[in-house]
Image: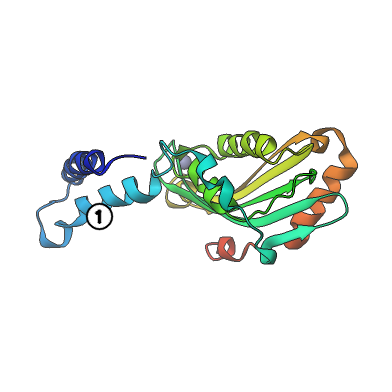
Amino acid sequence: MVSNEDLGNKLDKLKSVVREFIKLIGDDPDRPELRETPERVARMWLEELASGYGRDPDEHLKYFYVNSANYVSTNRLVAVLNIPVRSVCEHHLLPFYGYAYVVYVPSDEVFGLSKFARVVNVFARRLQLQERLTEELADYLFVKLKTKGLLVMIEAIHTCALVRGVEEPLSMVTLTTRGQLSTDSGLRDEALKIIKTGKTSRNLRLLKP
Ligand SMILES: [Zn+2]
């Protein structure tokens, strides 16, 4: 965690960078409507969009509990669905957002889950690639859940594709597996079926034409 003094220093520096940025793209940071923008943008980055830096996902482990609304359990698998993902693409510094789905083979250890969203945030609130985010989550959860098999899927809309380039809201799906969910195709099919029936893409659809 960063100290208040550190945060204050960073905030001041970032504010002047944002001011300079506004100037360089051709606007006037001193016009009244923009006067508070550098501070607002600097805070947004440090407190939200880039708040995952220097944070340890373990700090959230003890808070895991079950949120039954998004929790599915079958004989062989446990699924936590619709975990919000809010991140920033490292190529364009524009947001991508969507949902993560985690399906795993339960171990003897009883594990309550749902502060999953917080763990996802530690990894997502940094400059990211959706592919890397998926792998990082899988590596972390595979160990922490002490599971024999795990599948992580992320479906996200990339606003960099919406506002530039193809100018379409591209939805990208990334998926990775560990252990039994890599080797047992029957189990993997079951996992994908759970995701298909349980997922909501309500928020994603909002942007589609
Ligand atoms: Zn991008």
Image position of 156 (left or right of 55): right
- 11 lies above or below 35: above
In the rendered image, which residue does mark 1 sit on? 40
Whole-percent x, y for residue 134 in the image: 61, 39
- Closer to the camera, 50 or 78? 78
Query: Would residue 41 be seen by someone viewing this image from the given angle?
Result: yes
Q: Mark 1 falls on what kind of element?
A: helix
Q: Quadrant of residue 203?
A: bottom right
Quarter of the image where the C terminus is located: bottom right
Whole-percent x, y for residue 176 in the image: 70, 37
Name which residue lies at 68% across and 67% down: 69
Q: Amino acid at mark 1?
A: Arg
Name which residue lies at 24% across and 38% down: 6
- 160 lies above or below 135: below
Name which residue lies at 79% across and 43% down: 107
Name which residue lies at 54% across and 40% down: 58
- Closer to the camera, 47 or 60? 60
Image position of 114 (left or right of 168): right
For mark 1, does the 10 Å Cα neighbourhood hold few (<14), some (14 to 19), or many (20 or more) residues?
some
- 5 lies above or below 203: above
- Closer to the camera, 96 or 181? 181
The colour scheme is rainbow
Whole-percent x, y for residue 29 in the image: 13, 51
Query: Would residue 199 be seen by someone viewing this image from the given angle?
Result: no
Whole-percent x, y for residue 17 in the image: 20, 40
Q: Quadrant of residue 152?
A: top right
Image position of 181 (left or right of 144): right
Total number of numbered labels? 1
Find out if the beta carbon at label 1 lies less than 8 Å from the nearest ligand 1 atom: no
- Closer to the camera, 80 or 168? 80
Image position of 64 (left or right of 55): right
